[in-house]
């Protein structure tokens, strides 16, 4: 299972030590196991140096956490779309709240991702920004109110009306564009509520990465998608 | 040969397509071959997604092109010092002219690199900035006037007095701190001139990456160090 | 005449020495004279330190070149919406190609401008970005392909189809949202062509600021709006 | 009294509403009154749109909160050294913790300030960064541990050894370079302690701007300098 299908649970590894290097690979293997047990798509977004390691040793979709809008050339320290693609990523997060991009660069990153065959998942912070992002025509949007990220207070329960508003605005532009939500998601129930609101899944990080038993949480979340 | 020794030739792979992924590994293998033929230290700085690939399949020092100053935690899209270290890098470029950092972050990156056991190589753009950087106590400095980068006009010939000034200023702070120069370096003669000025080697990119015969250039540069 | 009306000619003073301080005030007075002669709205966007000087001494609309998305508080070096409002600006440019903002910050700046009673004019670089910006609901959009800025090659003649596409996309979101175009505009004829394409005016800089006879150009441009 | 002399108390107005526009002018007039009563140099750093207002209506030194490293030309939204100079500033803060600059830009800003006749005051966050900044040869340094800014816990009491270390490092580069300290300074006693450590004064913000009686605090601080 290399491409995304819906509903989807996407685990952002961020730069947590628990998801760096070999520990990241172990966590990705737990995600793979949960996928195999439930059949629900679980994707992971490891750090750039770990993309190849995880893509080569698991059979779940791997996303980069970021790409730069640049084309091949001079650009020391940038993350080139071609490089993450060749390393085995099937897509990339763009504009995460911890890596905000200019509007011009989001547009350019979506185009670059499409050029090299990467799925573009753009993160947004307000209903208005979600609406605007839909106009840029990415492959997926993840709406995440930044004030809830990392809190354990799930967006799907704390701000259901904002999620609904974001979904309605996206529908005006493109009714087929999948929208996820994220921020504070840490249980299967949070995921279930997110799907009930009309999203196609969730983007989360600490809820799984910092969990005592990540496998159990992943299975709970996947089952909530069935 | 995993750690740096001097004189050194460091090849920055930037995000050139010629040095991305498998092509980057091939180029690194040519660098390794040139090192084995000459005994001169040649290091490479591939993109983050390629660090592990190259570190695992060659026996030359691998540097990251950039690290972020952050500690493990939330920080989507950042490059964590621990991650590049575990991927096999022995050091990292910091503050390349294409990835300028705040002064506070350069200080923090040098400290982070030291914490995890990475060699810190800070790039500078003027003699004054080189002097300031020496005060931050990195492991290596590479002085590169940005107006010459990628031009083929070698800093060692076009601005010898600026290189000398940078070296003198560094010496006032720490006479044992190795200083390289870069920008426009594309022949063995350019390297020789750089060493005559008192540098401990060179940092370069397109001169090798975009060369018709990178191996020949690398051997020429390495021999200029003997 | 303190608020904008259409068609409008907006002169961005940038940080040209010809439009700094007293010379900026003189240029603004020429713009005021051209407005009084023609009745066409001409607005100016001086540097932050010159807003009050020009607003107090002319009777044309003054825009800031930039505001930050911040609310009053700690924020050294930021440009607060309240401060430019109190200094006499009636609006502000947001996201000029020389001051690109994150998508989240554009959204926040539009909201901040509205809160304090400033007109928000957001600059865009592609038709897609223009579409997205319309979704953020600013008061005006100025579409400026960055590759033409400062060239003297007018967007209205070099890229009429891109202007038309941008206008059509905006209309899908909000048919009443005024769209200007900019980049390379330097004659009355360029302005005329821009209006024929359906824009409500132009945003320009060097075409007037660096002109030998700015007053003549301004009158030509204003007359092209009649 | 238009130029700085030592000891000095510098009040950074930040973007507090209490120090914006006319309220900023009133606060500056209190600072002027405290200077006239005590003879101790008190300088203020208002927002860019307020520099001219305060410089024209008071007789104390006015500093910009920030300049950009650019020379006159294209650069929408930037703060040009020439513009703040002509507006009446005698100097500028550079690299405040709320407006961090790249090392290359700090070097360029110091040079730009000198070119146009502005005093350059560079803010630093660690002893090492203070040492590095001294090597860039600014006119003044203000060492401010960011973790104490806005806390009311004075650096001069909470981290005396760090202030001393910063002073010793600066002395190795240039014994005549004045060093201030800042962060958490809110009483005359905090100022006294700062001077005892060997600094030439203080940089502060909320301690005065948010005070119930800013004049009283300013007089207390000025008297602590006698």
Image (cartoon, coloured by chain):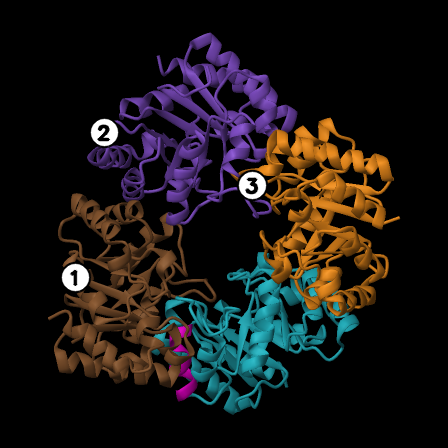
Chain colours: A orange, B purple, C cyan, D brown
Mark 1 Cα within 10 Å, few/some/many (few <14, many 20+)? many
Tag 3 subunit: A
Check chain identity for marks 1 and 2: say if they share one: no
* Quarter of the figure that contains the C terminus of chain D: bottom left
Residue at far left of view: D226
For marks 1 and 2, give the one nearer the viewer. 1
For marks 1 and 3, give the one nearer the viewer. 1
Q: Does the magenta stretch include residue C54?
A: yes
* Residue A106 placement (x, y as % from top left): 65, 54
* Residue A123 placement (x, y as % from top left): 68, 55
The residue indicated by pointer 3 is: A78
Q: Which residue is drawn at 67% across and 31% down?
A: A25
The stretch in magenta equals C48-57
Q: Which of the labelled discs sits on residue B175, or is there none?
A: 2
Residue at far front of view: A212
Q: Residue at x 27, y 44 (%)?
A: B128
């Amino acid at each position: 299972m290399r491409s995304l299908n819906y509903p989807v649970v996407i685990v952002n590894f961020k730069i947590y030590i628990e998801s760096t290097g070999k520990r990241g690979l172990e966590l990705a293997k737990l995600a793979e196991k949960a996928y195999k047990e439930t059949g629900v798509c679980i994707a992971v977004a490891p750090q750039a140096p770990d993309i190849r390691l995880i893509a080569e040793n698991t059979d779940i979709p791997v996303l980069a956490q970021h790409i730069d809008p640049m084309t091949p050339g001079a650009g020391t320290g940038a993350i080139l779309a071609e490089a993450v693609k060749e390393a085995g990523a099937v897509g990339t997060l763009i504009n995460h709240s911890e890596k905000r991009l200019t509007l011009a660069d989001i547009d350019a990153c979506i185009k670059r991702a499409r050029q090299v065959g990467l799925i573009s998942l753009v993160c947004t912070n307000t209903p208005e920004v979600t609406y605007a992002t839909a106009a840029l025509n990415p492959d997926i949007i993840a709406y995440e109110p930044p004030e809830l990220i990392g809190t354990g207070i799930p967006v799907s329960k704390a701000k259901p009306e904002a999620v609904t508003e974001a979904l309605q605005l996206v529908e005006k532009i493109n009714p087929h564009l999948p929208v996820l939500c994220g921020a504070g998601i840490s249980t299967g129930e949070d995921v279930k509520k997110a799907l009930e609101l009309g999203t196609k899944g969730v983007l989360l990080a600490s809820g799984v990465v910092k969990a005592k038993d990540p496998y159990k949480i992943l299975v709970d979340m996947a089952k909530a998608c069935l």
